[in-house]
Amino acid sequence: MLILQKIFKKEIGETPKKIVQLTGGSINNVYRCKLIDRDLVIKLNISHKHPKMFEKEKSGLELISKSKFLIPKPIIAGSFENYDYLILEYIKPGTVLNWQLFGKNLASLHKINNDKFGLNQDNYIGSLKQHNNFQKDWGAFYSNQRLLKLAKDARDLNLLSKIDSQKIDSLCKNLKNIVPKSKPSLIHGDLWVGNLMSNVENKPVLFDPAVYFGHPEMDWAMLSLFGSYPEEAMKNYCEFLPLENGFNDRKDIHQLYPLMVHLILFGSSYYQNVTNILNRYN
């Protein structure tokens, strides 16, 4: 693509010798670009569709890099003509993930704390805007910045009924009695197996973050929603940062948010999953 040649000439000072399109998501086009002495990755999208998405992704990756996790090091985010882009380090994938190390590294991420829940900027989860206004209480944050905002969006799209919205209101009022207290912890925010890989040394690598300071159970709930993880991962995590008893019984509370995100982005096929959780707590 000529646009990629122009971007690399502008930002890196050379043009790629070879460009290979990688498997990306539904939002961005992703390419591996071979240069003289290294390979880089570039993510590309249309500028007006998701403003500042890549700037926010870059800052999210930089936050995660403060933990023990490896990340594809972001080099630069910018705009050129009608495109936004993010240029990243290319990490050659491995074949086996060290889940014990994953658990330890996730604990190191969650030990990065803040005095309030939220983030100093809004960002994205998928293509959906994610609101991160700071709040001192997790129940208030999860209600006001997550569930209630998405409930309104879903109602506007006729994806939830008035009764469904009332059940969400009721659940939000009862969160403090269900979810244990936690320090605001830095979380990946969109942690499923599709945003996790290993390098050639089988060390875990995180990418495509939706970071904020949240409840650490959010990452575990998300990871178990769209896949699974070996018991050793959780066991090793808890050696460094134990979870309160009963996580498996209440994890659906924190799965409600990603399910509502999927309901809004992908439609009514996720409706039953959402209402099953609402009915359990109402």
Image: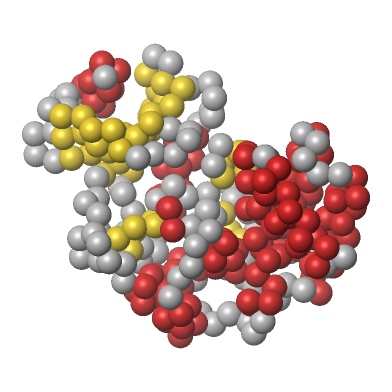
- Visible residue check, residue 186: no
Query: Which residue is at the front of the view, 195 or 87?
Result: 195
- Visible residue check, residue 249: yes
**Image point (44%, 58%), residue name:** 193
Does 146 sit above or below residue 43?
A: below
**Image point (80%, 36%), residue name:** 158
Query: Which residue is at the front of the view, 65 or 85?
Result: 85
**In which quadrant of the rendered view does residue 244 lie?**
bottom right
Q: Is residue 270 left or right of residue 164?
A: left
**Image point (43%, 27%), residue name:** 45
**In which quadrant of the rendered view does residue 216 lie?**
bottom right
Q: In the image, residue 119 lies at what x, y percent? A: 59, 50
Q: In the image, residue 167 lies at what x, y percent? A: 87, 57
Quarter of the image with the N terminus in it? top left
Quarter of the image with the C terminus in it? bottom right
**In which quadrant of the rendered view does residue 199 lie?**
bottom left
